[in-house]
Image: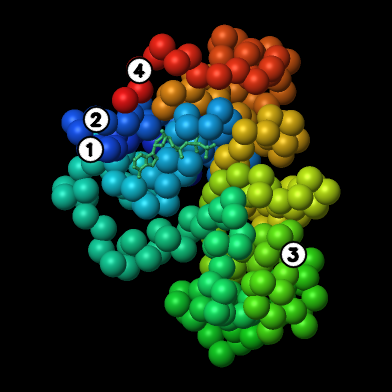
C-alpha cells in the first residue's frame, strides 16, 4: 500500500531553554511525529512534559534548538532557519494554515476590542471576504453557536464558554487547515466543557479540519481523537490509534497514566 505523506512532519525536534545560572531545561528531547490531513491527533502527558512547547514549535512561536518541521512537504520551521529562511509571504501563508485555540479564552482576547472586531481584524489582515467582513463575522458567530447580536459586546460581557466560542470563531475565520487546541476546555466550568468539545468535533467534521488536541484529560482525548501520542519528559513514548492506546497500552508510562495519575520520576534530571 502506498504510504501517504503527512501534512506535518516533525523530525528530531529538540527545544532546550537556557534558564540562567548555566542551567538548561530540555522541553523537547527529539520528537519525531507525523500529523495526517483530516485526523484529530491527541497529545497527552502530565504537566510540564512539553505538550504546549510542541504546539508552539508548529506555530513558530519558539525557535527549535534542533530538528525541523515540514508542512505539506516544505520546510516551515527548524534549527537550520538560516538555510531555509521563509519570505514574509510564505510565513504569512503558513500562519494562515495553522491556527490555535489556547486554554484561557479571557487572556486570549483584547479587552478593548468587541468580539466582532476580534474576528474582523483577522479577516482584514488576511484579506478574506473583503468588503463583507461583517457578514462573514456574523456567519462565524452562528457557526460557533452565538447569536450574531453579540458581535458588539466586549470580552468581559461573555461567559467563559462563550469567550472560548469567540476564540474558536476567530481561529476559523482565517480558514486554517490545521487547528491546534491547547487545553481548550481546562479553564472552563465542567458543565460547559462538553459543549465546547462537541462544538470542536462538529466543526472538525464540517470543515474537514486537521486537529492537534493537547490535553491532560484522557477521557476527552479518547472521545475526540483518532490517534494519541503520549509524552513523557519531552519525548513521545507511545503513539497509536486511540482505541489501541486505551485498550492495549504498551509503554509503562501510558499504563500508569491510564490506571491513575502518576508523577514524573523526580530522580530523572531535567534541568
Ligand atoms: N520559554 C520558556 N523558557 C523556559 N522554560 C520553558 C519555556 N517554555 C516552556 N518551558 C519549560 O518547558 C517544560 C515544558 O513546558 P510545557 O508548557 O510545554 O509543558 P506542558 O506539558 O504543556 O505542561 P502543562 O500541561 O502544565 O501546560 C516546562 O518545564 C516549562 O517550564
Which residue is at 65% across, 53% downward? 208
| Residues at circles 4 and 1 in contact by the CB criterion of under 8 Å | no
**Residue 116 location (% of width, % of height):** 63, 79
Q: CA distance from mark 4 to mark 3?
A: 41 Å
* Numbered circle sitting on residue 270: none
Q: CA distance from mark 2 to mark 1?
A: 6 Å
User: Mark 3, residues whose alpha carbon is within 10 Å: few (<14), some, or many (≥20)?
Assistant: some
User: Mark 4, residues whose alpha carbon is within 10 Å: few (<14), some, or many (≥20)?
Assistant: few
Q: CA distance from mark 4 to mark 1?
A: 17 Å
- Residue 145, by quadrant, is bottom right
Q: Earlier in the sequence, mark 4 or mark 3?
A: 3
Q: 216 left or right of 224?
A: left
Which residue is at 51% across, 57% downward? 99
User: Mark 2, residues whose alpha carbon is within 10 Å: few (<14), some, or many (≥20)?
Assistant: few
How many circles with numbers are drawn on the protein? 4
Residue at the spot of label 2: 23
| Residues at circles 1 and 3 in contact by the CB criterion of under 8 Å | no
Task: Answer above or below: position of 231 versus 126.
Answer: above
The nearer-to-camera label among 4 and 1 is: 1
Residue at the spot of label 4: 269
Q: CA distance from mark 3 to mark 2?
A: 41 Å
**Residue 140 location (% of width, % of height):** 69, 72
Which residue is at 48% across, 55% downward? 98
- Residue 199, by quadrant, is bottom right
Task: Answer above or below: position of 2 versus 70.
Answer: above
Q: Earlier in the sequence, mark 4 or mark 2?
A: 2
Which of 18/45 is in front? 18
Residue at the spot of label 1: 20
Q: Earlier in the sequence, mark 1 or mark 3?
A: 1
Residue at the spot of label 3: 159
| Residues at circles 2 and 1 in contact by the CB criterion of under 8 Å | yes
Mark 3 secondary-structure assignment: loop
Amino acid at each position: 500500500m502506498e504510504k501517504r505523506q503527512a501534512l506535518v512532519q516533525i523530525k528530531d525536534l529538540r527545544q532546550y531553554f537556557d534558564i540562567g545560572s548555566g542551567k538548561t531545561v530540555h522541553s523537547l528531547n527529539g520528537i519525531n511525529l507525523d500529523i495526517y490531513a483530516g485526523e484529530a491527533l491527541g497529545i497527552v502527558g502530565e504537566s510540564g512534559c512539553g505538550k504546549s512547547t510542541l504546539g508552539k514549535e508548529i506555530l513558530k512561536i519558539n525557535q527549535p534548538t534542533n530538528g525541523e518541521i515540514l508542512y505539506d512537504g516544505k520546510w516551515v520551521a527548524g534549527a537550520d532557519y538560516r538555510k531555509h529562511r521563509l519570505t514574509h509571504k510564505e510565513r504569512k501563508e503558513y500562519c494562515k494554515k495553522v491556527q490555535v485555540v489556547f486554554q484561557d479564552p479571557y487572556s486570549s482576547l483584547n479587552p478593548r476590542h468587541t468580539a466582532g472586531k476580534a474576528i474582523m481584524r483577522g479577516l482584514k489582515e488576511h484579506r478574506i471576504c473583503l468588503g463583507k467582513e461583517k457578514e462573514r463575522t456574523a456567519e462565524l458567530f452562528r457557526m460557533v453557536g452565538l447569536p450574531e447580536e453579540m458581535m458588539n459586546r466586549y470580552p468581559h460581557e461573555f461567559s467563559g464558554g462563550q469567550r472560548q466560542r469567540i476564540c474558536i470563531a476567530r481561529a476559523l475565520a482565517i480558514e486554517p487547515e490545521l487547528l491546534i487546541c491547547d487545553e481548550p476546555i481546562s479553564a472552563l466550568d465542567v458543565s460547559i466543557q462538553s459543549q465546547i468539545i462537541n462544538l470542536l468535533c462538529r466543526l472538525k467534521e464540517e470543515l474537514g479540519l486537521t486537529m492537534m488536541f493537547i490535553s491532560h484529560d484522557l477521557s476527552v482525548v479518547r472521545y475526540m481523537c483518532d490517534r494519541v501520542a503520549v509524552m513523557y519528559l519531552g519525548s513521545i513514548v507511545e503513539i497509536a490509534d486511540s482505541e489501541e492506546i486505551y485498550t492495549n497500552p504498551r509503554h509503562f508510562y501510558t499504563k500508569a497514566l491510564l490506571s491513575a495519575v502518576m508523577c514524573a520520576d523526580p530522580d530523572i534530571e531535567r534541568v
